[in-house]
């Protein structure tokens, strides 16, 4: 707000042009001191011009300074439009035998107009006068502050109430020249009063209220020197002068503020739960005390260690590894996977934590990237670095991720596979990918685009394939052969029609396909036979087909066998009768899915979606082991160089090596 000092009459004149009338401007005379006594003084002034502005307040302001101001000095005033001559009596903030300057003033919505001041000698005032404070150079909670005043009457002691920053406080040592109080702990500190050193004091006497500003310098917190700590349920920031009604401790982790739960706060320590991962050995904590932020680095964290000499073997039932540790940050284990408690070599392995104690933890191991073998070393995470000690172990899951999949094979289901020699082949949307010596290569691409239904069979080291829609009714579908030796792809006689491929097998150089399809408006199971030598399809409708539902064939020695969804049957092909006969019924698992089967020794291995990996003993006729897993493409299981491999995905797409030793 603008301030204007005027002589007896204030007149503002423009420079140049027409001269405006002084009546357009607000102006006021120098005050006249018309009475001075022991209770105060009375002043009078004349309004010499109201102009066009509305006057909101008028009165007198006095001070021992040469230019009194209404923002900082005592005043007596009235609101509204003033009379031409007005007088007001002041009975506060005057000490006896002191010289004061008094000015009259008018306040509008945009400015304050002051007269020139005049001086007078005071004889005192009836109200108390604040003179200052007597206390320590720096103050803290419960320190004593002596308030120096004048005009304090003994009979007013019982009537007086005192508030410091809005908190009522008791006073003591009451005398005519002052009183004392202790700084309360429960007032709300602000950045302004802590930095500016100005605090509000209010005195109430009967119906009178006196507001004063105390200049006090508050002590700053003092923090202890650095000390080494282990991870624990609770840490403490230590020092002196730490108390505040509002306290917080936080830590910045990758740009995010982690606010810790406080358990205790007092003058000498702030206790908190350090539930996070710390990226630094000597982290910087942001401590908010009395609305001021302090960067505190007094805690140095001890290293985490793995007790040496441990050889980790998972539990047979729970598959959990148990690891002995020292000073592991167990409180940080719920953080993002970016901050694991443990590091692995190879780095493609991670831990899923199940229980953590101060000296022991249990976890399972899973793969997030391709690894070259099952042996691993595990280290504690020391601020992003491996601990100096480690334990060894073996990755015991049957499926070991060995190689990343190319983009063209990153589909979750319906990717069938075949093996020719030492190479594996996989079909996806008309494209065949070859896997050999740890490398994938696209070897042929056709115009086939659907992957709902596939036929992917091997005859005399050539692959015959097609794909089409399940629900369609098209006939004469493209059918191809691929020769891995020459790399040539040839178009063959069209596949007869669309439908649901229940299963297929090869016998006597013929591909036998069971297809559920719509024939003249009725759903039938068709037997389709492809004669390789004649490049011709034969279509038959059987009254009692061997398979009404999905089936999956495999070779066991010189026998051709099949698992069928029809009552969970195990069947064997009769070469003489050219028909299937049932060996036994298996009712312990659901076969209503397409999957491929590989045999090693007496065991048939396969994966069923939403169920897991199975191993079936073909001699004992017993489903021995099941491993829960939904990782894999159920039709992609093949055997390459005596090892089973299969396509699948966790967070990435891999070719897995399946090891029967770990079933």
Image (cartoon, rainbow, N blue to C red):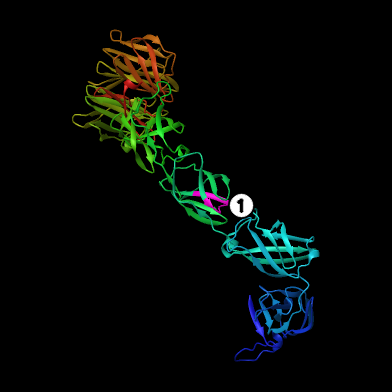
Is 236 magenta? The answer is no
Q: Position of residue 228 (x, y in %)?
A: 43, 44
Q: Position of residue 460 (x, y in %)?
A: 22, 21
**Dot 1 lies on which element?**
loop
In the displayed structure image, the side of residue 536 where residue 5 appears, left or right: right
Asked whether 478 or 375 is in front, the reply is 375
Residue to which mark 1 is pinned: 245
Residue extending farthest to the left is: 486
Asked whether 275 or 388 is in front, the reply is 388
Asked whether 620 or 587 is in front, the reply is 620
Above or below residue 208? Residue 494 is above
In the displayed structure image, the side of residue 166 where residue 35 appears, left or right: right
Asked whether 582 or 89 is in front, the reply is 89
Quadrant into which the N terminus falls: bottom right
Q: Position of residue 519 (x, y in %)?
A: 41, 22
Is 248 magenta? The answer is yes
Tell me if I can see residue 571 in this picture: yes
Quadrant into which the C terminus falls: top left
Above or below residue 137? Residue 15 is below
Tell me if I can see residue 545 in this picture: no
Q: Residue at x 67, y 63 (%)?
A: 146
Above or below residue 94? Residue 567 is above
Give the extent of the magenta segment.
239-250
Judge the density around disc 1: few (<14), some (14-19), many (≥20) Cα neighbours within 10 Å.
some
Q: Position of residue 320 (x, y in %)?
A: 41, 26
Could you say which quadrant of the image residue 205 lies in?
A: bottom right
Could you say which quadrant of the image residue 391 lies in?
A: top left
Q: Residue at x 54, y 47 (%)?
A: 270
Could you say which quadrant of the image residue 507 lies in?
A: top left
In the displayed structure image, the side of residue 221 where residue 579 appears, left or right: left
């Amino acid at each position: 707000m603008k301030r204007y000092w005027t002589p007896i009459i204030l007149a503002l004149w423009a420079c140049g042009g027409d001269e405006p009338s002084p009546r357009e401007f607000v102006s006021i005379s120098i005050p006249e001191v018309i009475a001075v006594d022991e209770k105060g003084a009375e002043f009078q002034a004349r309004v010499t011009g109201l102009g066009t502005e509305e006057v909101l307040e008028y009165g007198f302001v006095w001070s021992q300074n040469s230019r009194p101001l209404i923002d900082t000095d005592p005043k007596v005033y009235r609101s509204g439009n003033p009379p031409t001559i007005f007088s007001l009596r002041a009975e506060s903030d005057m000490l006896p035998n002191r010289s004061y300057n008094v000015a009259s003033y008018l306040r509008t919505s945009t400015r304050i107009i002051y007269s020139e001041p005049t001086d007078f000698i005071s004889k005192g005032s009836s109200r108390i006068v604040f003179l200052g404070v007597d206390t320590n150079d720096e103050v803290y909670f419960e320190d004593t502050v002596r308030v120096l005043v004048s005009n304090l009457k003994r009979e007013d002691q019982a009537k007086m109430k005192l508030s410091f920053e809005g908190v009522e406080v008791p006073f003591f040592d009451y005398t005519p020249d002052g009183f004392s109080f202790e700084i309360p702990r429960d007032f709300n500190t602000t950045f302004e009063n802590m930095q500016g050193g100005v605090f509000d004091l209010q005195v109430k006497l009967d119906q009178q209220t006196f507001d004063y500003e105390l200049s006090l310098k508050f002590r700053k917190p003092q923090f202890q020197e650095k000390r080494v700590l282990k991870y624990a349920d609770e840490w403490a920031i230590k020092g002196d002068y730490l108390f505040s009604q509002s306290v917080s401790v936080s830590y910045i982790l990758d740009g995010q503020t982690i606010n810790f739960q406080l358990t205790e706060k007092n003058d000498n320590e702030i206790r908190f739960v350090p539930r996070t991962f710390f990226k630094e050995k000597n982290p910087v904590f942001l401590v908010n005390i009395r609305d001021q932020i302090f960067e505190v680095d007094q805690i140095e964290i001890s290293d985490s260690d793995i007790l040496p000499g441990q050889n980790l073997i998972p539990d047979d039932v729970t598959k959990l590894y148990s690891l002995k540790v020292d000073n592991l940050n167990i409180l940080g284990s719920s953080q993002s996977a970016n901050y694991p408690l443990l590091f692995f070599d190879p780095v493609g392995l991670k831990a899923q934590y199940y229980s953590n104690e101060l000296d022991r933890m249990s976890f399972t191991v899973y793969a997030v990237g391709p690894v070259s073998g099952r042996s691993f070393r595990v280290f504690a995470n020391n601020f992003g670095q491996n601990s100096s000690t480690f334990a060894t172990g073996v990755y015991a899951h049957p499926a070991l991720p060995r190689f990343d999949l190319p983009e063209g094979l990153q589909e979750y289901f319906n990717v069938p596979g075949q093996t020719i020699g030492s190479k594996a082949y996989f079909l996806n949307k008309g494209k065949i990918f070859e896997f050999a010596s740890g490398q994938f290569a696209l070897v042929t691409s056709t115009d086939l685009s659907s992957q709902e239904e596939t036929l992917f069979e091997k005859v005399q080291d050539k692959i015959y394939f097609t794909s089409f829609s399940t629900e369609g009714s098209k006939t004469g579908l493209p059918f191809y052969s691929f020769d891995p030796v020459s790399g040539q792809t040839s178009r063959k006689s069209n596949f007869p029609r669309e439908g649901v491929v229940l299963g297929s097998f090869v016998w006597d150089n013929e591909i036998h396909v069971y297809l559920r399809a719509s024939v003249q408006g009725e759903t039938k199971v068709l037997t389709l036979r492809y004669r390789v030598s004649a490049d011709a399809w034969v279509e038959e409708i059987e009254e009692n087909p061997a398979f009404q539902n999905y089936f999956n064939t495999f070779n066991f020695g010189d026998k051709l066998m099949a698992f069928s969804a029809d009552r969970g049957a195990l069947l064997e092909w009769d070469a003489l009768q050219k028909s299937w006969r049932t060996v036994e019924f298996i009712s312990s698992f659901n076969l209503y899915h397409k999957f491929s089967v590989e045999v090693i020794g007496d065991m048939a291995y396969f994966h069923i979606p939403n169920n897991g990996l199975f191993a079936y003993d073909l001699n004992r006729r017993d489903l021995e082991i099941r491993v829960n897993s939904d990782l894999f493409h159920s039709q992609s299981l093949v055997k390459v160089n005596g090892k089973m491999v299969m396509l699948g995905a966790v967070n990435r797409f891999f070719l897995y090596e399946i090891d029967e030793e770990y079933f």
